[in-house]
Amino acid sequence: MKEEFIEFDPSITDKRTFYSTFLSNYNPPVQAINHFASIPWTNKWLSNPAYKIIPFWSRHVKTSGEDTFFGNTINTTETVPHFIMIQLKDFITPEPSDASSGTKLASDANAHNNNPPINRGPAELIFLLQFGERGVDGHPGVIHGGVICALLDETMSAVISQHLDNATPKPRGQIFTANLNTSFRAPVTTPAAVILKCWLVRRDKRKWLTKGQIEDESGRVLAEANAIWVLVPENKI
C-alpha cells in the first residue's frame, strides 16, 4: 500500500514550514511497520526506546511531481515494497562553523572522500528497507549500483532535513547534492531486508557533510557514501 499523495506546490508554499507540518500530520505506513516487526532483527530497531518512527517525506508523491521516483517508481511489490524511517529522539543540531568558500568546499570534498570523518555516535536516522525480487536488480539477484547511490543520496538528504527542522533559527533555502562518493563493499542482494544508517558529520554556514551506510542483518557494511550538500537561499533557486 502506497503512502498518501501530498497536495504541495513549492511555488506558493514554504517547504520548510510545510515539512514541519508534514511530520506532525502524516503517519508511517502500518503495513511496513507490521512487516519489519515480524522480522526479529529489524524489530529490535523498531522497539529501540532511543528512536521513534516518523513518516518519510520522499515516499509521498507531491502535486508538483516531486519524489515520483521514491514514492512511485520504487514503491512497488517488486522494487522496495516496505520503507520505514526511524529518528534518534535526542539528536543535537550543531552550530555552523565558519567555512563557506567554494575553494574550501572543493578541498573538503577531497578530504571527506579520501579519509571520511565518521560520526561514531548513534545514527540520527535509521531506515529499514525491504527489497523485492528483480525489480531493482542490475546483476541477477544484486541491486543496481545506481539505485544504491540514489538510496544513499535521498536518505542522507533526509538527515539534513531533520537537522534543518530542528535548528534554531531554521535556515531557509533548499539543499542540493554538491558531491557524492559511494563505495560498494559487498553485493546488496534481493530479495532481502537491510538497514541504512545516516549521520550528519559536520555543518558549515551553507555546507553540510553527511555519511550513510547500508548494512545487512549481521551488521556487515554492504555500501557506504559520503556527501557534501549546499544550502541554496530561496531567492537564488
Image (cartoon, rainbow, N blue to C red):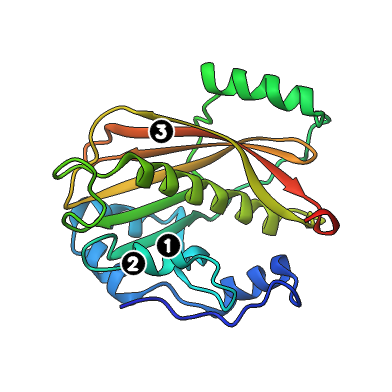
Q: Do we see residue 116 in this rendering?
A: no
Q: Badge 2 local density, few (<14 within 10 Å), some, or many (20+)? A: many
Q: Position of residue 35 (x, y in %)?
A: 23, 67
Say which mark, if any, is on residue 78.
none
Q: Position of residue 138 (x, y in %)?
A: 24, 43
- In the displayed structure, 115 sits above or below 83; it is above
> Mark 2 sits on what residue?
75
Q: Position of residue 139 (x, y in %)?
A: 19, 40
- In the displayed structure, 174 sits above or below 23; it is above
Say which mark, if any, is on residue 70.
1
Q: Badge 3 local density, few (<14 within 10 Å), some, or many (20+)? A: many
In this rendered view, identify the residue nearer to me: 67 or 118. Answer: 67
- Marks 2 and 3 sit apart, C-alpha to C-alpha, by 22 Å
In this rendered view, identify the residue nearer to me: 19 or 107. Answer: 107
> Mark 3 sits on what residue?
224
Q: Earlier in the sequence, mark 2 or mark 1?
A: 1
Q: Badge 1 local density, few (<14 within 10 Å), some, or many (20+)? A: many
Nearer the camera: disc 3 or disc 1: 1
Residue occupying image coordinates x 66% and y 69% = 20
Q: Do we see residue 66 in this rendering?
A: yes
